[in-house]
């Protein structure tokens, strides 16, 4: 997947829209480029929310502190990657996420010294029960909301481009077509063809984002050569 700078993406979109390019769209006073810069920020934030991009998944480890139950996620946290929460010390998954009624049950019973930790989430915070009595390493994954890598940096540090040299960590053709579509819609132009091009580019980008496993229709993942038989075909012929 190829990444381009914010300036390249905006100028490529502008060229396809029949607009002249500029050296730095973020320094331009042209209303069209002001709008394109705002559209790029909006489009990137939509991309984070609408799909779980593999390159935005982050593994995060933290250590519980005795008597402390609530922990805040890192600054770039956007949302949870479900079913990735593990206690690395006990090698057991965390129980949960517990529903609000279940959490009240845990709180009322005031469980102490449970074999398994349970967890409850509230925004960018994770709350564990029972209250930790010792240090435990909790490992999980989350989706980062940072998709902009400033020039010279080795990692993304924000969710809004501010300079032409900022690298946009999304597929470049997808972003170009997205800007074209949004610009045409804003101006009241027919965006039917552009919308189709954007949807195709998005599907390609999402489909190529990571390797896909082989789909297994067998009941046992260890028996890869088993075909349909009496064990996985519903009985018939009784009517």
Image (cartoon, helix red, strand yellow):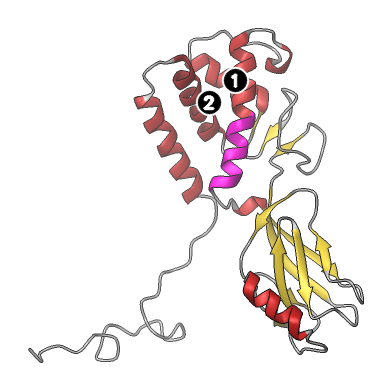
Q: Name the residue under label 1.
A: 36
Quadrant occupied by the C terminus: bottom left
User: Crowdedness of circle 1 by 10 Å Cα count: few (<14), some, many (20+)?
Assistant: many
Magenta: main secondary structure: helix
* 72 sits to left or right of 44: right
Q: Residue 38, how many percent across, how many down?
A: 63, 24
Q: Name the residue under label 2.
A: 179
Q: Residue 63 carries which label?
A: none
- Give the CA distance from mark 1 to mark 2: 7 Å
- Residue 170 appearing in the image: no
Q: In which quarter of the image is residue 54?
A: bottom right
- Residue 42 appearing in the image: yes
Q: Do the residues labelled 1 and 2 touch (CB within 8 Å)?
A: yes
Instruction: Look at 19% across and 89% down and name the residue there.
Output: 235
Q: Is residue 103 magenta?
A: no
Give the secondary structure at mark 1.
Answer: helix
Q: Residue 47, how many percent across, how many down?
A: 57, 41
20 lies above or below 100: above
Q: Residue 36, how many percent across, how many down?
A: 59, 20
Give the residues drawn in magenta, as a range.
41-50
Q: In which quarter of the image is residue 80?
A: bottom right
**Which residue is at the front of the view, 30 or 170?**
30
202 lies above or below 42: below
Give the secondary structure at mark 2.
Answer: helix
201 lies above or below 77: above
Quadrant occupied by the N terminus: top right
**Which residue is at the front of the view, 75 or 156?**
75
Instruction: Look at 79% across and 72% down and name the residue there.
Output: 138
Instruction: Look at 70% across and 75% down and name the residue there.
Output: 104
Q: Which of marks 1 and 2 is nearer the N terminus?
A: 1
Q: Residue 205, how many percent across, how many down?
A: 50, 44
């Amino acid at each position: 997947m190829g990444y381009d700078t914010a300036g390249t993406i905006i100028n490529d979109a502008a060229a396809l829209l029949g607009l002249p390019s500029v050296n730095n769209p973020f320094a331009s006073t042209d209303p069209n480029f002001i709008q394109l810069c705002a559209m790029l920020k909006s489009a990137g934030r939509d991309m984070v929310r609408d799909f779980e991009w593999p390159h935005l998944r982050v593994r995060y480890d933290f250590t519980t502190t005795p008597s402390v139950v609530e922990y805040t996620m890192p600054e770039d946290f956007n949302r949870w990657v479900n079913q990735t929460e593990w206690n690395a010390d006990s090698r057991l998954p965390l129980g949960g996420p517990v529903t609000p009624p279940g959490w009240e049950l845990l709180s009322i019973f005031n469980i102490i010294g449970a074999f398994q930790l349970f967890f409850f989430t509230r925004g960018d915070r994770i709350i564990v029960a029972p209250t930790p009595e010792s240090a435990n390493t909790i490992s999980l994954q989350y989706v980062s909301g940072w998709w902009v890598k400033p020039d010279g940096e080795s990692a993304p540090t924000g969710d809004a481009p501010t300079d032409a040299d900022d690298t946009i960590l999304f597929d470049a053709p997808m972003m170009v077509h997205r800007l074209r579509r949004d610009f045409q819609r804003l101006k009241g132009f027919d965006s039917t063809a552009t919308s189709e091009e954007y949807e195709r580019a998005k599907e390609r980008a999402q489909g190529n984002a990571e390797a896909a496993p082989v789909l297994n229709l067998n009941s046992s993942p260890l028996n890869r050569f088993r075909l349909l038989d009496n064990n996985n075909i519903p009985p018939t012929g009784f009517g």
